């Protein structure tokens, strides 16, 4: 297409925009004289009324002609507009179905939580992630110390997991600087720190970042207070700092006896309590038992609100034991520990892995003191905990992670069958929806 072909309609658009501004000025001047200066002379009144009518006519003409010029640009191919009714219909259908999805509250922190969220967003848009703010290690710890803000790392990962954004944007926000004073610092953490600087508080900053990245659902810090974690070991020593606890437990060869937070009466966000009380399902984990899940339950009213909720209370068991936190723990041991801090009715159902791993990967983890978490069904039955078995393992570069797709399917099926009593047709509809959305994104 020749330059001159779209130059003329392009010039006309600009010309009529200027013409429209002139019309606005005529109306503004006429109203100003009539209202502000209160013109009493009938001739002058007629003149300024005519001025307003002229201004309105000018705006009408400019708008009409500008639209004609824009249509000419579209027809010439300079502006490309694609209206696929089929795609629009599918998008509307998907959005409507996601809005009708179950209200799910997930509580935890670490990479396990964000991994699960990546799968859940394909089934429902009614997701609220309540994230721990006890992290004091790595880049988050540095920003916490330097700027006095709450640790952004886990929250950043959850926002990105729920975001509807381009892969390049996600890659940018996950980028870590390799040299200089910002070495090992994540750009996403800096972005959230900058957002905190122009917001009323950290909660507002998180919501603004979520809006920028078109997040499905909500991400909430469990508290806005400067929460710190400490643990008393069985040998009597007290370890302070989330990042130090498992390391010192291994070093001192002593289990964690008691976990606590300061301030002891840290207040939760009201939106977090509201989401818990209105939820269809509350999911604890997956994540580090003592440093990702339990810290949330120690925040005032969180555990009690979970217990009072009519939601289905699900725990996602870790696949591997974690040195310094859950050495030799079976599934029932994880739940007993959660009950110790959250109360007996904090968990009703557990989703546990039955998938196996190769001897090579198993040997690598054994060297670090980690092994597959064993399912002790007899003890779970005695505790009155429903067990849901599933293949949940996904191995990436010899690292064991939860398979976000399989885990999300299991969670949705469990919620619908045990809580919402949806018929099989509805479950299949959601499964079909998730596959369609994921295939479209690829």
Image (cartoon, grey):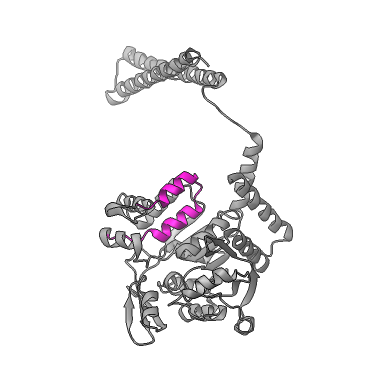
Rendering coords of residue 165 (x, y %):
49, 46
* Residue 314 can be seen, yes or no: no
Q: What residue occupies the far bottom of the structure in this picture?
A: 235
Rendering coords of residue 314 (x, y %):
57, 70
Q: Is residue 349 above or below residue 20?
A: below
Q: Quadrant of residue 148?
A: bottom left
Q: Residue at x 61, y 84 (%)?
A: 379
Is residue 182 or residue 310 the one in the foreground? 182
Horizontal side of residue 45 vs 393, given as left or right:
left
Is residue 17 or residue 70 the one in the foreground? 70
Is residue 270 or residue 29 the one in the foreground? 270
Rendering coords of residue 397 (x, y %):
52, 60
The span picked out in magenta is 148-177
The dominant secondary structure in magenta is: helix
* Residue 252 can be seen, yes or no: yes
| 155 drawn magenta | yes
Q: Quadrant of residue 267?
A: bottom left
Q: Is residue 239 above or below residue 400?
A: below
| 219 drawn magenta | no
Q: Residue at x 60, y 63 (%)?
A: 407
Horizontal side of residue 400 vs 172, given as left or right:
right
Q: Residue at x 33, y 78 (%)?
A: 239
Q: Residue at x 30, y 21 (%)?
A: 33
Horizontal side of residue 222 vs 364, given as left or right:
left
Q: Is residue 17 above or below residue 119?
A: above
């Amino acid at each position: 297409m020749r330059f001159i072909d779209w130059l003329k309609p392009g010039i006309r658009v600009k010309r009529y925009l200027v013409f429209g501004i002139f019309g606005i000025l005529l109306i503004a001047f006429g109203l100003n004289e009539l209202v502000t200066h209160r013109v009493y002379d009938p001739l002058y009144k007629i003149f300024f009324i005519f001025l307003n009518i002229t201004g309105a006519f000018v705006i009408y003409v400019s708008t009409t002609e500008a639209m004609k010029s824009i249509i000419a640009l579209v027809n010439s191919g300079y502006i490309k507009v694609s209206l696929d009714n089929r795609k629009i219909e599918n998008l509307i259908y998907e959005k409507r179905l996601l809005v009708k999805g179950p209200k799910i509250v997930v509580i935890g922190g670490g990479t396990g939580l964000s991994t699960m969220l990546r799968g859940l967003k394909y089934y429902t848009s009614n997701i609220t992630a309540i994230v721990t703010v006890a992290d004091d290690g790595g880049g988050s710890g540095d920003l916490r110390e330097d700027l006095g803000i709450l640790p952004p790392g886990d929250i950043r990962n959850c926002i990105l997991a729920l975001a509807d954004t381009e892969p390049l944007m996600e890659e940018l926000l996950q980028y870590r600087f390799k040299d200089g004073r910002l070495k090992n610092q994540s750009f996403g953490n800096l972005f959230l720190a900058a957002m905190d600087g122009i917001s009323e508080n950290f909660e507002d900053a998180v919501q603004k970042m979520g809006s920028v990245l078109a997040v499905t659902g909500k991400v909430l810090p469990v508290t806005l207070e400067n929460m710190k974690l400490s643990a008393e070991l069985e040998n009597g020593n007290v370890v302070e700092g989330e990042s130090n606890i498992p390391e010192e437990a291994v070093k001192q060869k002593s289990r964690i006896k008691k976990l606590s937070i300061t301030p002891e009466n840290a207040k939760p966000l009201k939106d977090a309590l509201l989401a818990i009380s209105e939820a269809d399902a509350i999911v604890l984990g997956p994540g580090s038992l003592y440093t990702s899940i339990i810290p949330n339950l120690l925040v005032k009213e969180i555990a009690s609100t979970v217990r009072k909720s009519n939601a289905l209370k699900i725990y996602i068991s870790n696949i591997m034991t974690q040195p310094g936190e859950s050495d030799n723990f079976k599934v029932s041991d994880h739940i007993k520990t959660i009950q110790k801090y959250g109360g007996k009715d904090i968990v009703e159902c557990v989703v546990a892995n039955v998938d196996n791993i190769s001897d090579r990967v198993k040997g690598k983890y054994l060297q670090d003191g980690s092994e597959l978490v064993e399912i002790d069904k007899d003890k779970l039955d005695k505790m009155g905990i429903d067990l849901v078995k599933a293949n949940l393992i996904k191995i990436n570069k010899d690292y064991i992670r939860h398979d976000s797709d399989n885990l999300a399917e299991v969670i949705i099926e469990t919620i619908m069958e045990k809580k919402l009593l949806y018929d099989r047709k509805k479950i299949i509809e959601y499964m079909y929806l998730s596959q369609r959305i994921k295939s479209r994104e690829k």
